[in-house]
Image: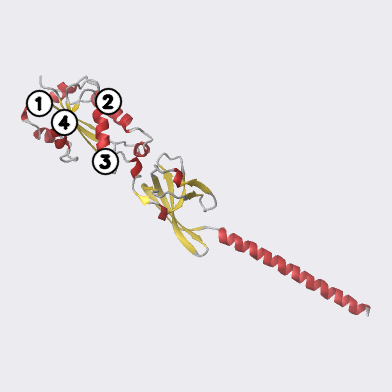
């Protein structure tokens, strides 16, 4: 009798142990399942040596994420004027599906993260686009006393690739040809400065003023009518001059550059 009781006790203990083990196994499997459903893994990647510009045109909340999609970093809705620069694309896999995410950085290099590429539109953010006309007006306003001239502007607009003094001079009225001065300024050679200019972190006016001042100071076409007209001048010395400007558009790799056509008053 005692032997049968002991057998029942042992069987009961074994059964309870098995049940407990089964529950533990199920709990462990459940935990693994939850972990699997929230984990993002990387597949193929592609790097872009020359960062490509993009912007977010939407109004709703979309986020930049951390490297493995675990933490929300920034809401793009709060960056309506920002141009984002793509440096890498990543295939992120999750729950048997995959999507392409872009690793992007703001133009001022202060904000970065990963975002699904479908949220972005390729190109410079149009909100901060300093139109060509606005840029040209900004430059003209720097020349104190100079008067914008429509006929001279027509010549400036002929072809922005023509930056030869002789090419422009030949289009002028003969009576103005020996009073003509051509100044040119270049866009930033430094990519960081270029991004700052595009995004508005660097004032177009401040950039243009510095470049024009340098162009006047370093003008070196000596022993020419042009040099004799321009030597020793600064931006406050152009009262009575005619002016026209052809500025390179924001979509140009040389944005910030411009051709400035000036005609001195008749003596």
Q: Position of residue 140 (x, y in %)?
A: 23, 29
Of residues 229 and 38, which is closer to you in this image?
Answer: 38
Query: Decide: marks 1, 2 in contact (CB < 8 A)?
Result: no
Q: Colour scheme used in the picture?
A: secondary structure
Tag 2 residue: 213
Q: Position of residue 74 (x, y in %)?
A: 49, 45
Residue displayed at 12% across by 24% down:
225
Label at residue 118: none
Q: Position of residue 253 (x, y in %)?
A: 29, 42
Tag 4 residue: 149
Q: Is tag 2's residue or tag 3's residue first in the polypeptide sequence?
A: 2
How crowded is the residue under tag 1: few (<14 C-alpha within 10 Å), some, or many (20+)? some
Q: Is tag 4's residue or tag 1's residue first in the polypeptide sequence?
A: 4
Q: Is tag 1's residue or tag 3's residue first in the polypeptide sequence?
A: 1
Q: Position of residue 141 (x, y in %)?
A: 25, 28
Residue displayed at 31% across by 37% down:
189
Q: Quadrant of the N terminus?
A: bottom right
Tag 1 residue: 178
Q: Is residue 148 visible?
A: yes
């Amino acid at each position: 009798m005692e032997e049968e009781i002991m057998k029942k006790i042992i069987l009961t203990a074994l059964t309870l142990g098995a049940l407990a083990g089964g529950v533990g196994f199920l709990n462990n499997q459940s935990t693994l399942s939850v972990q699997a459903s929230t984990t993002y893994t990387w597949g193929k990647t592609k790097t872009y040596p020359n960062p490509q510009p993009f912007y977010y045109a939407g109004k709703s909340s979309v986020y930049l994420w951390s490297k493995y999609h675990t933490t929300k970093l920034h809401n793009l809705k709060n960056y309506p004027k920002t141009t984002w620069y793509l440096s890498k694309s990543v295939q992120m896999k999750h729950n048997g599906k995959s999507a392409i995410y872009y690793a992007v950085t703001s133009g001022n290099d202060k904000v970065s993260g990963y975002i699904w590429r479908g949220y972005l539109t390729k190109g410079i953010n149009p909100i901060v686009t300093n139109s060509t006309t606005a840029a040209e007006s900004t430059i003209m306003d720097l020349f104190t006393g100079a008067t914008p001239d429509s006929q001279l502007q027509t010549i400036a607009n002929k072809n922005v690739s023509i930056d030869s003094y002789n090419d422009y001079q030949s289009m002028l009225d003969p009576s103005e040809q020996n009073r003509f001065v051509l100044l040119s300024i270049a866009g930033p050679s430094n990519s960081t400065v270029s991004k700052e200019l595009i995004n508005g972190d660097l004032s177009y006016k401040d950039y243009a003023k510095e470049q024009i001042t340098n162009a006047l100071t370093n003008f070196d076409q000596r022993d020419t009518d042009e040099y004799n007209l321009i030597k020793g001048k600064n931006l406050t010395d152009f009262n009575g001059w005619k002016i026209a400007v052809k500025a390179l558009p924001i979509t140009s790799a040389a944005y910030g550059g411009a051709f400035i056509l000036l005609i001195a008053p008749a003596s």
